[in-house]
Amino acid sequence: PVLSKALLVEAIRREAQRDLPLEISKIHLFWQTFRVTKANREVIFAGAPRDVYDPFRMGLQGSKIKPRLWDLKPLALLRAVGRSKAIILDVHQETADLILVLDGVPRSVRALASPPNTSPEDRARQFADEISRSVDYYQASQTSVTVPPETPIVVTGQMAGDFHFGHALRSATSFPVEQFVSPLEAPPEFPAAAYAAALGAALKKGHPQRAGKGLWTVDFNVFPDELKRQPVSPKAVAATLALVVAMAGIYPVYQGKQAEALTLEAKQAQLSRAQRQISLGKTELKNRAAVTERLAKVEAQIRVAQDERNALRPVGGEAWFDVEEALKAAPGGVVVSRVAAIGGAIAFEGTAPRMEAILDFVSSLERTGQFFQVTADSITRVSAPGGDRFAYSITASRTPSPASGK
């Protein structure tokens, strides 16, 4: 109910003691109001166990780190997804978090685990069962609330980009499965789903924002009260003023010394610039030699590619195939590293950032009109410096040349 501030705090502590699994003395309790009507006030509260929270806090203190905002991962994921109704499944190698969101509020939060050697397909089926169980339990305990069947499952975390996991999850659940969309501008190849919690933390304000009449967003600072900066006392202000007056007497002497120090610093800066220019000159000479060597290698590769392209050109005009037109069909991020003629077919090999991009390449090749029976013979995940990629091998039968009349 609508109460005075003092009574409201006590009421929230009693509700927390009744609902949370730990004693109130063993947790740090944080809360905020997210909806107010004439009759009542709706409050969301979160409890962080002290045995987990305090060592983290003391570690930051010992490292001389002074944060201003702290967040909880489920709240950061909620903010990153930005949906008023959703089932967020944050999946990593051995753990997962399941968050049921209704009306922009996390209603249920569960931590899931599976054996480390479980296949992506088995993990997807296991998590689909957990989603069904969590939704059923929540609806049974909240008779006035239902989870609509069109509520989307938004997958985040390291496993979000796994093709086999996503395909198995779609097959195992009745809820629609959607890809995570970055709330911040990012390049297409950026794995935003793997960094969803970090993106949500970057959007944090630390205080609720008005979302409508009597409604606020869920955004509160889980920062311990004992570490919040205290206001400066009048005694401290007076002591600071006295120190400033004392320093005024020695300022002229300090100013002369400071001028000498600045002159010396300028000389040292000139010397450093000269040394830097010498170092850059040496580096430039080395780079020129390296560039010349790389150019020779590239020219050799170009000659090999030209020979391969010439070998692909039809002799009697019976096979129609334009290398440049075929390569234009490759979607963004798809690299074609080898093209070879195999009888009446053409083989394409290369890498792509996502499995879906390879399937798009297959469709694009068919749409050029130059090929039929385009198939992806193999798709394998490979490690790369910028993140995992997918190596592919595609075979396409060449369409007869229009000039031949066949």
Image (spheres, rainbow, N blue to C red):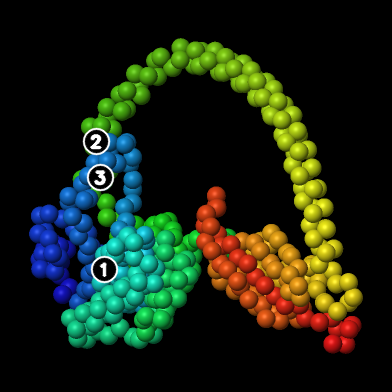
Instruction: Look at 27% across and 27% down and name the residue there.
Output: 239
Query: Residue 91: x and y, percent?
Result: 37, 65
Dividing the picture into quadrants, the one containing residue 226 is top left
Of mark 3 and mark 2, the one earlier in the sequence is 3
For mark 1, give the secondary structure: strand
Of mark 2 and mark 1, the one earlier in the sequence is 1
Instruction: Look at 42% across and 64% down and name the residue there.
Output: 159
Q: CA distance from mark 3 to mark 2?
A: 30 Å
Instruction: Judge by depth and name the residue closer to the eye, 310 or 251.
Output: 310
- Which amino acid is tagged 1? Val
- Whether residue 328 is visible to the viewer of this picture, yes or no, is no
Instruction: Look at 24% across and 82% down and name the residue there.
Output: 136
Instruction: Look at 18% across and 55% down and name the residue there.
Output: 49
Residue at label 2? 234
Residue at label 3? 57
Crowding around mark 2 (Cα neighbors within 10 Å: few <14, some 14 to 19, many 20+) is: few
Instruction: Judge by depth and name the residue closer to the eye, 19 or 2.
Output: 19
For mark 3, give the secondary structure: helix
Pointer 1 and pointer 3: residues touching (CB < 8 Å)?
no
Residue at label 1? 109
Q: CA distance from mark 1 to mark 3?
A: 23 Å
Above-or-below relation of 228 to 38: above
Crowding around mark 3 (Cα neighbors within 10 Å: few <14, some 14 to 19, many 20+) is: some
Q: Nearer the viewer, mark 1 or mark 3?
A: 1
- Which amino acid is tagged 3? Arg
Is 26 positioned to the left or the right of 259 in the image? left
For mark 2, give the secondary structure: helix
Query: Residue 152: x and y, percent?
Result: 40, 79
Viewport quadrant of the C terminus: bottom right
